Image (cartoon, rainbow, N blue to C red):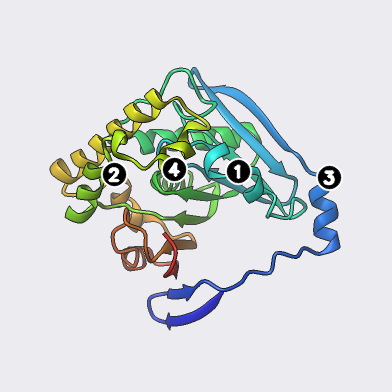
Amino acid sequence: MVNTESSGNNGVIIEESAPINTEMSNATKDSNEDCTIHEDTTIINDLKIGYCIYGHGENRMLFICGGVGCYKKDYPDCVLSAFNPSVYTIVCIDPPGYGTSRPPDRKQEVNRCMKDAGFCIKLMEHLHMTPFSVVGWSEGSRTAIHVANQGKQYVKSMILLSAGSRVDYRGAGIFRGMRNTEQWLPDAMEAYLKFYSKEYVTKQWADLCDVVQQVYDLLGGRFPCDYVLPNLKLPVLVLTGGMDRFCADPKYFTTVLPNCKMHQHISSS
């Protein structure tokens, strides 16, 4: 990546995309060839929770998917295999009601991510994968914040991808405009239909958009995770795209998290 702007005081770095070297060393190739992705389920709080494990390294990480996602959609094999399995152990969870953590289907609600955090922590305890770093994508970033808060004794660091702990007038309008999946472009829906039925996507996405509207109308635009941010002292990396329509100003995190750095790829969505 090419660094085009840096502000030393607030930890913000803005980058432009540049060619990425995809060649791997022989050692990495050999270790990747020996590593497979293991999928399994367990019971937590009387609910089936699906997950997968990749790698066997000392650096343990928990990956949490985004809204109406699942680990197979948001963290496919090609993403996991980019990590050296001798260095990292990655656990990907399907939160309750998503992916392999069904039935039952997900019940969208304002406190959903806060509740999901308890399942994440119990899964890592069950797998004896503590301490660990947590990675959250989109909706999963809000869950990651709660994981870091509820599991302070376990969580070493946090990475937030396309994160938003608040929603403003513009963001609420974008979600309202996307509530009706019949108006989506075919390619947008196709990404979900590889893992879910159209009926599931239509209902879940509408319910999720309704939750965002509730947060904007009734909670002043603040998701529950926004209130716990000042309590977090762990190292945080915020990754965002300059063309992301769903996130409010990502530099906000550097004002409330004392140990936060932000990298923005200005041409990414």
Q: List the residue tagged with mark 2.
A: 224
Amino acid type at image mark 1: Pro
Q: List the residue tagged with mark 3.
A: 34
Amino acid type at image mark 2: Pro
In the shown orientation, is residue 212 left or right of residue 139? left
Which one is in front, 150 or 64? 64
Foreground mark, 4 or 2?
4
- In the picture as drawn, the residue positioned furthest to the left comes out as 217
The residue that appears at 14% across and 41% down in the rendered structure is: 218
Cβ atoms under marks 3 and 2 closer than 8 Å: no
The residue that appears at 52% across and 30% down in the rendered structure is: 195
Which labelled disc corresponds to residue 76?
A: 1
Foreground mark, 2 or 1?
1
Q: Report, in whole angstroms, how far the alpha carbon at label 3 lies from the one at label 2.
A: 42 Å
Which one is in front, 7 or 79? 79
Foreground mark, 3 or 2?
3
Residue 239 spot, x, y in % from top left: 46, 62
Quadrant of the image for the N terminus?
bottom right
Quadrant of the image for the C terminus?
bottom left
